[in-house]
Amino acid sequence: MGKNNSKKNKKTLTPAVFLDRDGTVIFDRNYLSSPKQVKLYAYAADSINKLRNAGFKVIVVTNQSGVGRGMFTQKDLKKVNDKFIFLLKKSGAKIDGLYYCPHIDEDKCLCRKPNTGMVLQAAKDHGIDLKNSYTVGDSVRDYLLGNNSGGKGVLVLTGHGKKQVEKVKNEKIKPLSVCKTLKHATELIINDAKKT
C-alpha cells in the first residue's frame, strides 16, 4: 500500500469521507497512467470543500492495479497523483490524504478495496472516527469498503457506477444511497450526518 500526504494526528477522532479517485473525483480513463489525462469533475473541488467545511476529513483511497499488472509504474502513478492534487489546489480545494493499493485481486492484499487496509492506515495517521465516516465511489467495492470499516457507503453513477447498479442487486449489503454524482453524495452525507 502506498500513501501520499499523510501525517500522524493524535487529536480527537474526526469523521472522514473516503473518496474513490477515478470515476468519482476525476474522469475515469481506464488505467490512467499519464498526468495529461487527469481531469476533475466540475463539482469535485466544491464538493470536497463542502465536506471539509462540514467537519469531515477528506481522504482519497484508490485501487491502482495497473501497477500490479505492469501497465505503469509507481513513479508514473505518483506523477498522476501529484497532478490530481495540483488541480484540486488550483481549484481551491485540498484533501487530507491519498492512499493507493498497487496490487491485483490475486495478491489477496489487505489494502485492496473492499478490504480495509487503506482506511485503517488513514484512520491511524489522521485520527479518524470510522464509525461516523463514509465512503463514496463508482463501484460496489467502494461502498462495501464503508460497511467493512464500520461506517456507511455511497455509490455514485459516474465512472462505472451505472454498470454497477445491477451488481448491487446481488449484494447482501446495500449502499446507504445511490447518488447521481459526488455533488449529490456530498449533500446526502452532510444531511445524514446531521441526523446521527
Image (cartoon, rainbow, N blue to C red):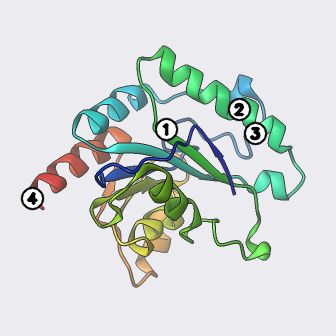
Residue on which disc 1 sits: 25
- How far apart marks 2 and 1 lie (CA) works out to 13 Å
Closer to the eye: label 3 or 1: 3
The amino acid pointed to by label 4 is: Lys
* Crowding at mark 3 (Cα within 10 Å: few <14, some 14-19, many 20+): many
Residue on which disc 4 sits: 195
Q: Are marks 2 and 3 in contact (CB under 8 Å)?
A: yes
The amino acid pointed to by label 3 is: Leu
* Number of the label disc, if any, that sits on residue 80: 2
Closer to the eye: label 2 or 1: 2
Q: Are marks 1 and 4 in contact (CB under 8 Å)?
A: no
- How far apart marks 4 and 3 lie (CA) works out to 38 Å
Could you tell which of marks 4 and 3 lies nearer the N-terminus?
3
Q: Secondary structure at mark 2?
A: helix
Residue on which disc 3 sits: 77
* Number of the label disc, if any, that sits on residue 147: none
Q: Are marks 3 and 1 in contact (CB under 8 Å)?
A: no
